[in-house]
Amino acid sequence: MFHYIINMNNNIFWGRVKELIKTHNMTQNQFADHLGFSRNTFRGWIYHNRIPELSSAYAIAYTLGVSLDYLVGGKDKDMVQLRLKEIEARKSAARVLKMIEKAQKELLHLRPLT
């Protein structure tokens, strides 16, 4: 994974960031201010095509509502959809566990045939 991040295409990262900032009807300066980043630092990352440190890159992705994987070139864009899928999987697993527990309790009350 680390090797992948180092060798990723920075143009993809910043292209997606810029596109998403526009879809949120913000300027780059407004976005930097919203995140608490220096405007000069943020513009410098873009101008020099440099990916910020991991915590800053994650903050950018989180604020834009996408996964960091998407910003670095992945396909899963929407964190909300990923989270909903995870929640549904957890609910399904919980239902299955309840069914197993219920079946185990019922088996305990059965008497063996003699």
Image (tube, rainbow, N blue to C red):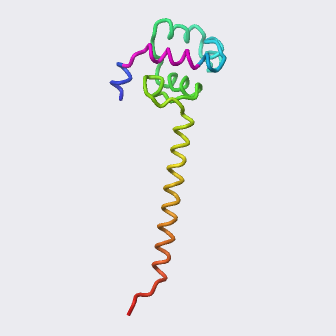
In which quadrant will I find the C terminus? bottom left
Residue 22, by quadrant, is top right
Looking at the picture, how far across and down is residue 26, in whole percent?
A: 65, 16
Taking depth in this image into account, of 95 and 29 the one nearest to the observer is: 95
Taking depth in this image into account, of 15 and 2 the one nearest to the observer is: 15
Q: Image point 35% across, 24% down: which residue?
A: 4
Residue 84, by quadrant, is top right
Residue extending furthest toward the left: 3
Looking at the picture, how far across and down is residue 71, in whole percent?
A: 48, 23
In which quadrant will I find the N terminus? top left
Q: Image point 57% across, 7% down: which residue?
A: 40
Indicate whether residue 60 is drawn in magenta.
Answer: no
Total number of numbered labels? 0
Taking depth in this image into account, of 68 and 39 the one nearest to the observer is: 68
Taking depth in this image into account, of 48 and 64 the one nearest to the observer is: 64
Magenta span dominant secondary structure:
helix
Q: Image point 54% across, 40% down: which residue?
A: 83
Q: Image point 49% across, 15% down: which residue?
A: 14
The answer to whether residue 86 is left or right of residue 2 is right
Which residues are drawn in magenta? Answer: 8-20
The answer to whether residue 10 is left or right of residue 95 is left
